[in-house]
Amino acid sequence: MTDPKALLDWVTEHREDLLSDLRTYVELESPSGDKESLNTTLAWLGSWLEERLGEPERVSRVDGGVHGDIEVRDYPGTGDRPVLLLCHYDTVWPLGTLAEIPFRIDGDRGTGPGIFDMKSGLVHAVWALKALDAAGLPRPRIRLLLNGDEEIGSLASRPVIEAEARDAAAALVFEASADGAIKTARKGVGIFRVDATGVEAHAGLDPEKGCSAIDEIARVVLTLHGLTDLSRGTSVNVGIIEGGTGTNVAAGRASARIDVRVASQEEVGRIDRAFAELRPHDPRATLTVSGGWNRPVMERTPTTVALYERARDIAAELGIQLDEISVGGASDGNFVAALGIPVLDGFGAVGDGAHARHEHISVRGMLERTALAAATLTALA
């Protein structure tokens, strides 16, 4: 019988080791758009993982092109199907941020670029496995996936994630928690663009000869914003509009870029139909829709609920109230959940400030989440 408190005691004894690993990792800046820095970080991660976990059964590295590479490591364990551990090593912070926001531990508070989203999470995952080995407890087969382009939409990594997830029994995503809560549902995300063409003409001399693309886009904006239905979990936001060449010219071109969040496949269909049905107000104009769904909906399924309830009960043994939550943001867990695999997201840091300068973690939360991950994994063995 697993004693989660004994695992927490062991992790707490190794507090300084966890923080040392976290410091080294945070101080390796790894912005999504800097391939050289990402390569340096991934090289360190490889050597660190071998030092902490030993040689894996399999290592696979996929070139991400201009984006960060994707690395997958399989470790032995019980059962035929692996548990997938999802982590990304890219951050939103540009090179040089470390000089402005250095790694620092002040009491229970840890700060540094990317510490919350999501460098602390990978440290949790690795030390959870070490805790199980030290305790002589079983663990399932482990498939650890390191993604280098999550923060920019997982453009290169999506097919790798989906391929590596297909035979998984479950997936734990070590993204940051939501005020300590586990994410059992995430919205799907669509990124669309609408381009309008019109007919240019002098706005004062020949207004009747002109056909304004800006007028068309303005009508599109009103139509799209009218699709928002928060009762269904759907929000549509036109975040950027561009167009025109001068105040005295009927605009020949204009465009709108749109962010869509939905909580169900039914809403995916409704939004798709709305985009397909867009028509210009002036027959001389044209409207062209491009883009699509960046991440599918991560729906709260019965298998995910069962997995959450198991983790919740383990957390209770640690004296932790582990709540669940549905959030509007997406992660790589969306891809896995869409394959019908149970996913628990938010096994990473307890803290706040994703993508913000007040980004921070709780050190005590780091120790507790590591023990929780270890106990959950051995329960899945």
Image (tube, grey):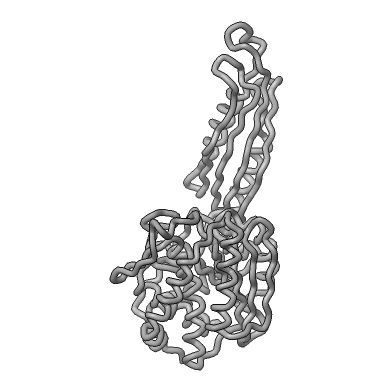
Task: Give the left or right position of residue 285, taking residue 303 as reference.
Answer: right
Task: Give the left or right position of residue 50, taking residue 308 as reference.
Answer: right
Report the residue at 50% width, 69% height from top.
Answer: 174
Relative depth, front residue between 115 and 42: 42
The single residue placed furthest to the left in the displayed view is 107
Residue 346 can be seen in this image: no
Query: Is residue 253 placed above or below 376 in the rendered structure?
Result: above
Query: Is residue 76 placed above or below 326 in the rendered structure?
Result: below
Residue 243 can be seen in this image: yes
Task: Give the left or right position of residue 352, taking residue 153 as reference.
Answer: left
- Please tell me in which quadrant of the rendered image residue 55 appears: bottom right
Report the residue at 34% width, 74% height from top.
Answer: 364
Residue 346 position within the rendered picture, expressed as x and y whole percent measured from the top left: 47, 66
Query: Is residue 331 placed above or below 136 in the rendered structure?
Result: above
The total of numbered circles placed on residues is 0
Report the residue at 62% width, 11% height from top.
Answer: 202
Relative depth, front residue between 125 and 187: 125
Report the residue at 56% width, 73% height from top.
Answer: 45
Q: Quadrant of the C terminus?
A: bottom right
Residue 179 position within the rendered picture, expressed as x and y whole percent measured from the top left: 38, 63
Residue 237 position within the rendered picture, expressed as x and y whole percent measured from the top left: 52, 40
Residue 63 position within the rendered picture, expressed as x and y whole percent measured from the top left: 69, 64
